[in-house]
Amino acid sequence: MNPPVSYNSVFKFTLKGQTLELTREGAGFVVLTLAVGLGAINTGNNLLYLILAMCCSFIAVSGILSEITMKKIQIEISGPPEIYAQSPVPLVLRISNHKTRTPSFSLRLALQPDAARGDLADREIYLFHLPAGGAVEKTLMLTAQRRGRIEVSCCLLSTGFPFGFFIKRKKRQVNWSATVFPAIHPVSLPAPRDGLAGGDHRVERLGEEVVALKEFRPGDPLRAIHWKSSAKTGTLRVKEFSRQGPESFTVRLNLADPGTGGPVEPEVIEGRVSRAASLIYHLIDRGDDVRLHAGKYQSAFGQGGAHRTTLMRYLAFAGLNE
């Protein structure tokens, strides 16, 4: 079900963390109630007094039912184990109604991440009906703009139930936090090699097993040419060998000015950290052994998801004043 159109409030009142907003429809109803009241006083008409009492009861019932529908609502957040800056990730919100007999209606939930970080949630969550003692899970996408620590301490819960005359908003504590890894971008990876390089050429390591044939390209070793296939097709074709194992690469990160040794601008640090993280991410994804050398920090060579997570956790806070 699609959420209804957002309310247009004309008056707002805040007290003890709770906000009450008067909508445009509610303002019209209040004006109508006042007009009926003035008419009843001036004319002494009993029917107008009955209509006035009914209008006042609508306002009272609206406040009581909205308070009941927001009572005993609990919100829990769970996220993925790895979060990278500038990449949307799904957050699962579990909304539970701990009332034993009374359901809740027309609830809206909006995350309130740290405004200083600029983190963004893609939408609000709308629940038309939440049964008594029930729970529902909804997913939204959160984009962390910067690496470091992200915290969502509260969620804004609101409702216009039952008539839409008033919007009641309350904050609910959620206390969710996570580590945001640096942003990952496409980078040019060093080609696999066995350490012999010089001038404008390199010597690639050849495995023992031929896995495919491909067209000859400048730079391919001549001893890898498959002469029999080349003679049949009329074009040079070379053998593609399996690799004999993972390569080893050291990614070096310098957080200071190489000339003076002093600090550099935060934008420069972010660019260096993001590039180092991107190299590590893609090299490990390729199956290589990688280690990180950043100032006094030096990791061991490793590969796989656990090693990558360890390096990313270090890079998430490298150079930050936290």
Image (tube, helix red, strand yellow):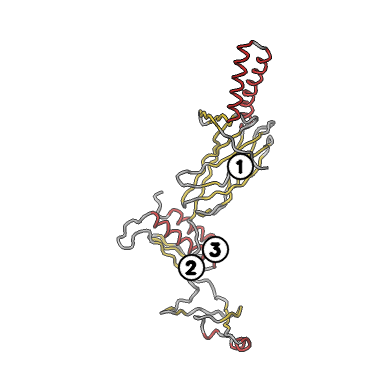
What is the x, y in percent for residue 227? Answer: 59, 88
Residue 212 horizontal/vertical position (percent): 61, 78
Image vertical order of residue 312 relative to residue 27, above or below: below
What is the CA distance from the residue labelled 2 to the residue labelled 1?
40 Å
Mark 1 is on which residue type?
Ile
Sequence-first tag of 3 and 2: 2
Q: Position of residue 137 (x, y in %)?
A: 64, 44
Residues at marks 3 and 2, CA–CA distance in whole angstroms: 20 Å
Q: Examine the rendered structure and indicate whether residue 138 appears above or below residue 257.
A: above
> Disc 2 vs disc 1: Cβ atoms closer than 8 Å?
no
Q: What residue sits right under mark 1 in the picture? A: 125
Viewer-proximal residue, 12 or 44? 44
The foreground one among 19 and 137 is 19
Hey, which residue is sitting farthest top in the picture? 44
Examine the image and state in which quarter residue 105 appears.
top right
Count of picture labels: 3
Using residue 272 as the reference point, say whether residue 54 is left or right of it.
right
Q: Can you identify the residue that label 3 sits on?
A: 304
Residue identified by numbered label 2: 188
**Circle 3 sits in a helix, a strand or a loop, which is it?**
loop
Q: Residues within 10 Å of mark 1 (few under 14, many from 20)?
A: some
Q: Residue at x 55, y 32 (%)?
A: 9
Residue 213 appears left or right of 277: right
Sort mark 2 into few (<14), some (14-19) or many (20+) by Cα contacts within 10 Å: few
